[in-house]
Amino acid sequence: MAWLRQHTWWWFALLAGTTVVVGVTELASGGPIVTIDNVQALTGMTSVELAANSSQAYRLIEFNVRVEGLHLILVGALVGAIVVYGFRHDRRWAWWTMWSFPIYTVSLLVLNLIVKTAPGQAPAAQAFTGAIVGMLSAVILLYSAPRFFPRKSRC
């Protein structure tokens, strides 16, 4: 158990790396591969139908997906730096800072549930998968807390 608690930082390192990879994918593709689910949930049209219906709207979505890719690369790099230079070395500031990730993913879920989807469409699946990853991160943070807040002995 102690070994697992000591190495929880690997979860966040994997998360940071995955975030960078997704960001690079979105930046390179412009989104047709990654955001098909979102486009259909919000517009009721596939990416191809939207591009045929309004090339300007499609170009705007594609641009925004590329910007989101840049944001994800930055977030992944920052999370990686926090993990490598703080969390891995049991710095309390890093433990508190890592709580921003579960808060962020849950807020994205709330946003996805608040925004109205197109008639007959379900919310995009990535809203739920992101929240699951965020909640798993919260559980891992709680599990690793004793590393950052050791009990003081009464000697």
Image (cartoon, rainbow, N blue to C red):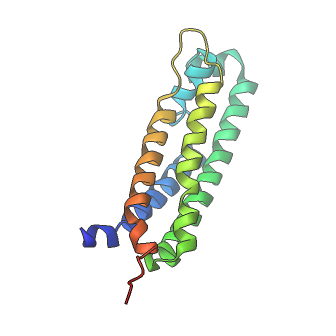
Q: Residue at x 54, y 70 (%)?
A: 94
Q: Residue at x 33, y 73 (%)?
A: 6
Q: Quadrant location of residue 52? A: top right
In the rendered image, residue 47, in percent from the top left (x then y), is placed at: 58, 23
Residue nearest the viewer, comparing 11 with 61: 11
Residue nearest the viewer, comparing 119 with 2: 2
Outermost bottom residue: 155
Q: Quadrant of the C terminus?
A: bottom left
Q: Is residue 67 left or right of residue 98?
A: right
Outermost front residue: 155
Q: Quadrant of the N terminus?
A: bottom left
Residue 8 appears in the figure: yes
Residue nearest the viewer, comparing 20 with 134: 134
- Count of all numbered marks drawn on residues in the image: 0
In the rendered image, residue 64, in percent from the top left (x then y), is placed at: 69, 39
Q: Residue at x 44, y 46 (%)?
A: 135
In the rendered image, residue 87, in percent from the top left (x then y), is placed at: 48, 72
Q: Residue at x 68, y 32 (%)?
A: 61
Residue 31 appears in the figure: no
Vertical comparison of 95 with 32: above or below: below
Q: Is residue 119 left or right of residue 6?
A: right
In the rendered image, residue 22, in percent from the top left (x then y), is placed at: 50, 49
Vertical comparison of 81 with 18: above or below: below
